[in-house]
Image: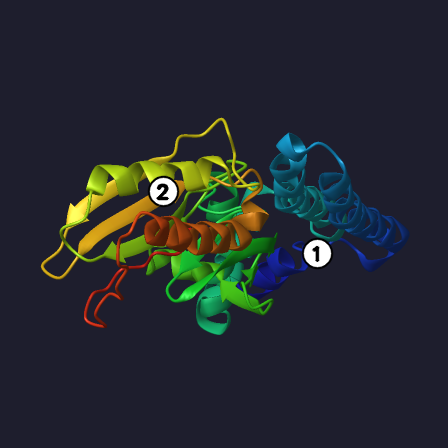
Amino acid sequence: MGDISKERASKLLNDFQDINFVSILLIIAIAWLVIHLSRRVLPYLAERGPSQFRLYLIGAVPVIRLLTLTVAILWIIPIIFNITMQNFLVIAGAASVAIGFAFKDLASSVIAGVVAVFERPYRPGDWVRIDKDYGEVVSVGLRSLQLRTPADDIVTVPHDRIWEENIVNSNDGAHTLMCVADFYVAPGNDAARLRAGLQRVAATSAYLHYDRPILVIVTEKPFATHFKLKAYPFDMRDQFQFLSDLTVRGQIAIAAAGARPISAPVSIDEEGTAG
């Protein structure tokens, strides 16, 4: 019985002299070249080509990497292993046990990364918030993604956060996103006049995306009238300049209308940020 088991185990691997190591090295080199070129060429074209194609080009990078790695692995396995249905079950069982015990967290992140490639809760070029981290997705790997924050920090976030955290995607593949500027004005002013003035502020901004709507939401608070100015920049990378422009010129417009802006109390939890 032991001899039979040893014979079966020995057949899992091809004979050493039958393994073509040159082919394996060539496959690895081709896969590395394809991945390297996709990571260099597609972002280069995205930054210099038409803006409407930017997200599609940089979003293709993780898909190409995943497909390339999958093809390379499936190509190499028959060269090394003697693939039969019985051997496949033995290899798959052993690999799953090893991964489950030794690389549980890594496997969880890799599986979540594969899910993310197809479900696309985020992709390169998207602006997302994961827990307290907000920024642009600059790369999506098999284990993690990288965010560039407004402070120009790079934050590495494991993919397995999608199992536990809500992923807030501000643009979801679109070429722009909503920016929100908040203004609090003392009660008793002409709300219609102030609303029209804030709409003009957004309509005359150099950063405005003219094909998207401008909204001014007015709500009455116990301490003030709250004006929420919502508009879209032409390029979402200009969201913070756009928000600053709306805020500064909006305050000037409110003062010119004879209204008195006030600060919101600390207890009021209003985001008032891009996205």
Image spot of residue 244 (x, y percent) = 48, 56
Q: Quadrant of residue 144?
A: bottom right
Q: How many numbered marks, from 0 up?
A: 2
Residue with the mark numbered 2 = 198
Front position in the image: 12 or 275: 275
Amino acid under disc 2: Leu
Which numbered marker is on residue 221? none
Q: Residues within 10 Å of mark 2 (few under 14, many from 20)?
A: many
Q: Tell whether label 1 touches label 2 (CB within 8 Å).
A: no
Residue lying at 83% horizontally and 46% vertically, measured from the top left: 30
Q: Is residue 151 above or below residue 225?
A: below
Amino acid under disc 1: Leu
Which numbered marker is on residue 13? 1
Q: Describe residue 205's horizontal placement relative to residue 191 as left or right.
A: right
Residue 90 seen in the current view:
no
Question: What secondary structure is found at the residue carrying circle 2?
Answer: helix
Dot 2 or dot 1, earlier in sequence: 1
Q: Quadrant of residue 270?
A: bottom left
Q: Residues within 10 Å of mark 1 (few under 14, many from 20)?
A: some
Question: What secondary structure is found at the residue carrying circle 1?
Answer: loop
Image spot of residue 251 (x, y percent) = 38, 55
Residue lying at 61% horizontally and 63% vertically, measured from the top left: 6
Q: Describe residue 216's horizontal placement relative to residue 116 as left or right.
A: left
Front position in the image: 260 or 238: 260
Residue 56 seen in the current view:
yes
Image spot of residue 76 (x, y percent) = 74, 48
- Per the model, the C-alpha gap separating discs 2 and 1 is 72 Å
Q: Describe residue 210's horizontal placement relative to residue 216 as left or right.
A: right
